[in-house]
């Protein structure tokens, strides 16, 4: 079961990666069309970022809920299951933190560009 969960998470990461790549390619092709195309790319990027944050939040909430159920002694909730969910939440949060760090670095680099 844990291998299936890992495969599911990896497939989600791959699909998000494909979405980002296809959005970036569309943004390059539509950049000459004017502000409407750029706003559409920004909206798509913001939407993708929001989905990523919500996904991390849901993963954390699921892990916290499962840990609380284990602490209450709910039947069917086992330690390996709780640990797996907690590790998935930890990995997703670290990935989100790295994305944030890359955004901050990119922002600083853009702000330091000479006019």
Image (cartoon, helix red, strand yellow):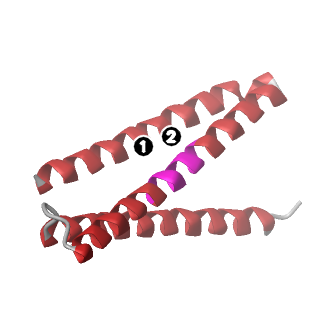
**Foreground residue among 69 and 54:** 69
Q: Which residue is mark 2?
A: 20
Badge number at residue 83: none
Circle 2/circle 1 CB separation < 8 Å: yes
As measured in the structure, the alpha-carbon distance from the residue carrying label 2 to the one carrying label 1 is 5 Å
Q: Percent x, y for residue 18?
A: 42, 37
Q: Which residue is mark 1?
A: 17
27 part of magenta stretch: no
Q: Quadrant of residue 41?
A: top right
Q: Residue 103's spot in the image, x, y percent?
A: 62, 62
Image quadrant assignment for residue 39: top right
Q: Taking 49 as reference, is 64 above or below it? A: below
Q: Is residue 59 left or right of residue 28?
A: left
The residue under the point 37% across, 38% down is 15
Q: Secondary structure at mark 1?
A: helix
The crowd level at tag 1 (other Cα within 10 Å; few <14, some 14-19, many 20+) is few
How many numbered discs sit on the rendered protein? Answer: 2
Residue 55: percent from the left, percent from the top?
45, 52
Q: Give the residue displayed 48% in from the left and 59% down from the top.
A: 57
Q: Assess whether residue 49 is covered by the magenta stretch.
A: yes
Residue at the (85%, 64%) spot, across then down: 114
- Please provide the residue range marked out in magenta: 48-56
Q: Main secondary structure of the magenta part?
A: helix
């Amino acid at each position: 079961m844990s291998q299936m969960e890992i495969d599911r998470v990896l497939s989600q990461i791959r699909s998000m990666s494909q979405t980002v790549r296809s959005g970036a390619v569309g943004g390059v092709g539509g950049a000459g069309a004017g502000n409407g195309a750029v706003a559409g790319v920004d909206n798509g990027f913001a939407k993708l970022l929001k989905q990523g944050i919500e996904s991390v939040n849901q993963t954390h909430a699921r892990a916290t809920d499962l840990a609380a159920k284990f602490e209450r002694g709910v039947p069917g909730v086992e330690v390996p299951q709780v640990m797996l969910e907690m590790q998935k939440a930890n990995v997703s949060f670290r990935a989100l933190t790295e994305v944030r760090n890359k955004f901050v670095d990119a922002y600083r680099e853009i702000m330091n560009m000479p006019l």
